[in-house]
């Protein structure tokens, strides 16, 4: 073989090795706490299939629903130790790692879906995501609309006075305590997977979640009233660890693009479901109570700019101005 042929063969081999280096195989675990019938799980499965197709099978994501790899606090911790690679989680759960990113989950701070969309695309959200990354080594890859949270109970709740001493389940996160504390309720942190049984057995009197969640978790079977407090407009974050992303090579761009598209896809589905579900619940015999939100807002308002919040006044004003 001539020297020129040998040189060409070496060049081809080096190119092949380089290409392999930029397109690495990866098996990733995506964990969350939602049921298989929820839109969150279904769109995660769609994203996993789409990523596999677009990377020619190099990146394979297995989705673990319904707290099968741990409850929400545990899967957040799992990102840091490599037990999971991608998660859905609420901003209120990552508040303990980087407080300001939880601002969107504070009571009555978001004004509706259009406001939420502007926040999702804003410099403020990008800055807060960067701050979370610096604090944890995990990266926010998408923001998902979870819906407006409403209180379910076995009695009508039409005013803050109706919530006095009400034992209400809330997620185990600091931000979720603000609303019930402001109206004199008795907040009881509890894992998502335990709520149905706790309501059924009377361990708690009430819970609060968006309408689609109330439906797919079947809380309406054990609660006679849905009270449209709309006290929090909730989001989920799609988060991946640096270690998982660093192993993807050039396929990282595909993963980022698909996960962001998945986040918007399920957001649109959840928002539409909110519009349709009030009549559906009434057809099931559930009392859906329209309320005047202003007294609830007035009860919470002083707390939103108090010393205990984890965000700055600059964050608060910029979010309000969107």
Image (cartoon, helix red, strand yellow):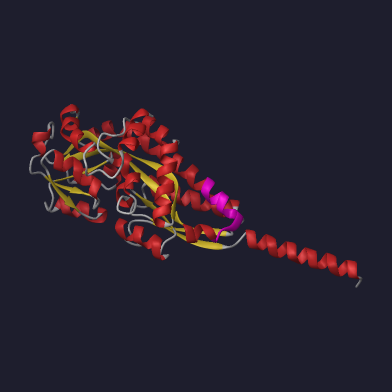
Query: From the viewer's perspective, is 139 left or right of 235?
Result: right
**Residue 170 at x, y percent in the picture:** 21, 48
Query: Which residue is at 35% across, 61% downward?
Result: 77
Q: Specify whether residue 286 is in view.
A: no
Query: Which residue is at 74% across, 65% downward?
Result: 14
Query: From the viewer's perspective, is 288 left or right of 246?
Result: left
Query: Which residue is at 24% across, 37% downward?
Result: 107
Q: Quadrant of the C terminus?
A: top left
**Residue 74 at x, y percent in the picture:** 32, 61
**Residue 117 at x, y percent in the picture:** 41, 33
Residue range of the region highlighted in magenta in the rendering? 247-257
Query: From the viewer's perspective, is 276 left or right of 180?
Result: right
**Residue 21 at x, y percent in the picture:** 64, 62
Q: Does the stretch in magenta take in 250?
A: yes
Quadrant position of residue 87:
bottom left
Q: Does the stretch in magenta take in 105?
A: no
Q: Is residue 204 above or below residue 122?
A: below
Front-lying residue, 105 or 269? 105
Q: Specify whether residue 51 is in view.
A: yes
Query: Which residue is at 12% across, 31% downward?
Result: 159
């Amino acid at each position: 073989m001539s020297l020129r042929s040998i040189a060409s063969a070496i060049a081809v081999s080096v190119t092949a090795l380089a290409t392999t280096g930029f397109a690495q195989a990866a098996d990733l675990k995506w964990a969350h706490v939602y049921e298989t019938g929820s839109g969150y799980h279904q769109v995660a499965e769609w994203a996993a299939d789409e990523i596999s197709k677009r990377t020619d099978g190099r990146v394979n994501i297995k989705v673990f629903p319904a707290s099968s790899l741990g409850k929400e606090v545990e899967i957040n911790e799992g990102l840091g130790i490599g037990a999971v690679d991608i998660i859905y989680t609420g901003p209120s759960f990552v508040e303990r790692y980087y407080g300001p990113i939880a601002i969107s989950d504070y009571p009555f701070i978001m004004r509706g879906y259009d406001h939420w969309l502007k926040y999702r695309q804003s410099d403020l959200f990008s800055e807060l995501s960067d701050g979370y990354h610096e604090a944890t080594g995990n990266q926010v890859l998408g923001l998902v609309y979870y819906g407006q949270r409403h209180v379910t109970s076995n009695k009508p709740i039409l005013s803050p006075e109706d919530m006095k001493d009400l034992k209400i389940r809330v997620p185990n996160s600091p931000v979720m305590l603000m609303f019930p504390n402001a109206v004199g309720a008795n907040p009881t942190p509890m894992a998502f997977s335990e709520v149905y049984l706790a309501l059924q057995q009377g361990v708690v009197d009430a819970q609060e979640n968006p309408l689609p969640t109330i439906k797919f978790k079947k809380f309406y079977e054990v609660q006679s009233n849905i009270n449209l407090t709309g006290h929090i407009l909730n989001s989920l974050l799609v988060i991946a660890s640096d270690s998982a992303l660093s192993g993807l090579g050039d396929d990282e761009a595909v993963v980022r693009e698909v996960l962001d598209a998945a986040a918007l896809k399920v957001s649109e589905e959840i928002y539409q479901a909110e519009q349709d579900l009030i009549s559906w619940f009434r057809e099931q015999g559930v009392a859906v109570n329209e309320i005047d939100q202003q007294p609830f807002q007035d009860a919470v308002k002083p707390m939103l700019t108090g010393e205990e919040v984890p965000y700055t006044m600059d964050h608060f004003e910029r979010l309000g101005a969107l």
